[in-house]
Image: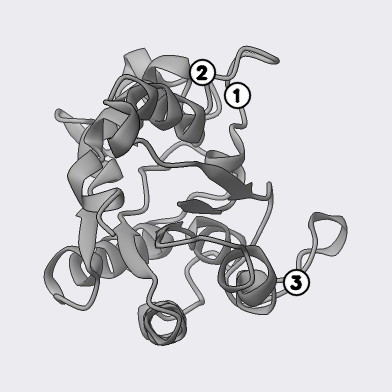
Amino acid sequence: MVFFGDSITDGHSSTVDANLRYPDQVADRLLERPEAQQCGVLNSGISGNHLLTDAGTQGVSAMARFENDVLDQPGVHTVVLLEGINDIGNSEGAVEPEQLINVYRQFIERAHDHDIRVVGATITPYEGADYYTEAGEEDRQAVNEWIRNSGEFDALADYEAAVRDPDNPSRLLPAFNPGDNLHPNDEGYAAMADELDLEEICAS
């Protein structure tokens, strides 16, 4: 399976060289299963990545790299999509939710054309981050509402619910916040890994 995303998938703020990024921790869970039920993990997270636009030294947009990083990889049967916070944050809410949703729909269609199942991941909280705005938070909530309720994905990974502060849902749980209010720490990544239904992501 491919984990496709930005710096959160890439493992920003996880312990260096400890393999505690959330896809690593999913891989650890998979290795605990019987050998016949194991499946491989490919981390295709790029820090700073955007859905809609290229990001300078961070590389091309998610739209441009989806074919190479997902569709052209051998043996892929599932992709977990976690993208969009950089579009929302860097535009200060100027990007409309429908623009991001249209990209998700293209990903779903292209993946299904290759018999790849798509897990939609909700965008995690970011209040307090350098590029947080109230307009952006409204957009994040709108996108997450669609991810949860559209029925267009094959499965759901509700990462927002896994790492948010129940007393302030627009923020990371303090125990999961390394200080930048955007990227989870090792424990937060563990909560994200635990959120995935292995039967869903490893279904053939």
Q: Is residue 172 visible?
A: no
For mark 1, give the secondary structure.
loop
Q: Nearer the viewer, mark 2 or mark 1?
A: 1
Residue assigned mark 3: 54
| Residue 4 sits above or below residue 93 on the image | above
Give how far across and how far down residue 151 sits, in percent: 14, 75
Q: Residue at x 15, y 28 (%)?
A: 167
- Quarter where residue 118 is shown: bottom left
Type of the residue with mark 2? Pro
Label 1 – label 3 distance at C-alpha: 23 Å
| Callout 1–callout 3 Cβ contact below 8 Å | no
| Callout 2–callout 1 Cβ contact below 8 Å | yes
Say few, some or many: other residues with alpha carbon within 10 Å of mark 3 (under 14 / 14 to 19 / 20 or more): some
Q: Earlier in the sequence, mark 3 or mark 2?
A: 3
User: Which circle marks residue 13 in the picture?
Assistant: 1
Q: Residue at x 15, y 30 (%)?
A: 166
For mark 3, give the secondary structure.
loop
